[in-house]
């Protein structure tokens, strides 16, 4: 129900550092929350949380997932009552054993209703007899909104690490999860040529109450204390450092620093880059892509 890190109360989603002393506060009446799926790191943790949510709140999860999917289908002009052949195809392609299991997955956040609905939209497009749908709207579908807290159903591509403010596109993977890339990502462009039908329009939501990781690269003079000065300036810019790497040139004159930092959006990142650029000894700084 709570955690103390180095004798201070901290949020459960706090990322640990080497040497931290952790005290776990438990309570017999405390139960796992679906929001934990958005930040736990191990597959074992995700599996245990999902199992609990399924078994304890299964009827509620099924009902909620059914309502969310029906709403998403109506938004696409599809009647919520799907014909049996279409349901059979959907279950085969989604690896769900039953429609109740699919609805439960949506209800606990393992799958996004909007993505399942769009998958159904694609299945209907290839069938002669199907539920009513306005095919003229196929190219004008409203983009799926991304908030960054959807959990495992939506992930940010590690190749380009999109942040709010970036133009983004979504890749529908075969397990119906969504992988979000920046529009100019080279990896995304190559994969889009191979499977153009698996890409949809996405956009950032208005309320994004979290930090997003991005990579920056610096070229610095090899002088004493520069790493500490750069790290301090990043901290002063209200950004968290999650990774630091360094490459040295053959002449030992310049170093190339690589940071992974957590920022709010592109505006925040631009301010950070501007501040670090002013540090004595920094000759170049830019956001690293791919």
Image (spheres, grey):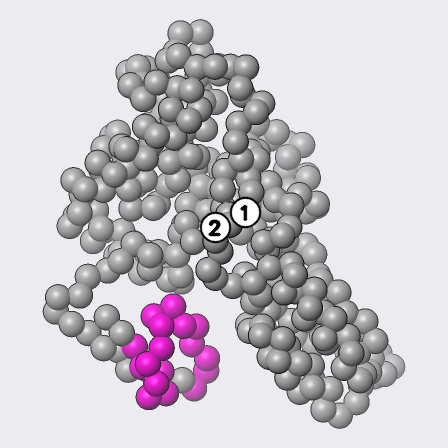
As drawn, 65 above or below 157: above
Q: Name the residue under label 2.
A: 147
- What residue occupies the far left of the structure in this picture? 28
For the point 65% across and 74% down, which residue is it? Answer: 245
Q: In this view, does 217 lie to the left or right of 13?
A: right
- What residue occupies the far front of the structure in this picture? 206
Q: Is residue 14 magenta?
A: yes
- What residue occupies the far top of the structure in this picture? 128
CA gap, disc 1 and disc 2: 6 Å
Magenta part of the protein: which range? 3-19
The location of residue 258, given as percent across then percent down, is 68, 71
Q: Name the residue under label 1.
A: 204
Q: Is residue 259 magenta?
A: no
- What residue occupies the far bottom of the structure in this picture? 224
The location of residue 75, given as percent across then percent down, is 42, 26
Viewport quadrant of the C terminus: bottom right
Q: Which of 209 and 63 is in front in this view?
A: 209
Q: What element carries label 2?
A: loop
As drawn, 135 above or below 65: above
Residue 187 visible: no
For the point 50% across and 38% down, which residue is it? Answer: 144
For the point 38% across and 68% down, which residue is it? Answer: 13
The location of residue 10, given as percent across then percent down, is 36, 77
Q: Earlier in the sequence, mark 1 or mark 2?
A: 2
Q: Which of 265 and 157 is in front in this view?
A: 265
Q: Nearer the viewer, residue 102 or 174?
A: 102
Q: What element carries label 1?
A: strand
- Judged by its main secondary structure, the magenta piece is loop
CB atoms of marks 1 and 2 within 8 Å: yes
């Amino acid at each position: 129900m709570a955690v103390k890190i180095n004798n201070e109360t901290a949020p459960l989603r706090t990322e640990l550092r080497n040497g931290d002393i952790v005290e776990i506060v438990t309570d017999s009446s405390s139960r796992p929350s679906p929001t934990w799926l958005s930040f736990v790191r191990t597959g074992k943790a995700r599996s245990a949380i999902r199992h609990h949510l399924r078994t304890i709140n299964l009827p509620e999860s099924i009902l909620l997932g059914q309502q969310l999917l029906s709403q998403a289908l109506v938004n696409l002009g599809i009647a919520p009552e799907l014909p049996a052949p279409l349901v059979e195809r959907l279950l085969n392609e989604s690896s769900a054993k039953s429609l109740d299991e699919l609805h439960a997955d949506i209800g606990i956040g393992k799958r996004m209703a909007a993505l399942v609905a769009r998958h159904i939209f694609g299945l209907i497009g290839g069938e002669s007899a199907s539920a009513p749908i306005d095919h003229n709207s196929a190219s004008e579908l409203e983009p799926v909104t991304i908030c960054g807290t959807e959990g495992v159903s939506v992930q940010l591509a590690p190749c380009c690490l999109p942040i709010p403010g970036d133009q983004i596109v979504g890749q529908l993977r075969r397990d119906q999860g969504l992988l979000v890339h920046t529009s100019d990502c080279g990896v995304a462009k190559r994969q889009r040529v191979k499977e153009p039908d698996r890409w949809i329009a996405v956009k950032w939501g208005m309320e994004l109450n979290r930090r997003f990781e991005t990579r920056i690269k610096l070229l610095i003079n090899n002088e004493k204390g520069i790493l500490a000065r750069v790290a301090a300036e990043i901290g002063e810019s209200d950004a968290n450092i999650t990774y630091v790497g360094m490459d040295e040139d053959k002449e030992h004159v310049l170093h190339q620093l690589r940071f992974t930092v957590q920022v709010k959006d592109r505006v925040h990142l631009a301010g950070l880059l501007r501040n670090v650029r002013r540090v004595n000894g920094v000759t170049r700084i830019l956001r690293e892509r791919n």
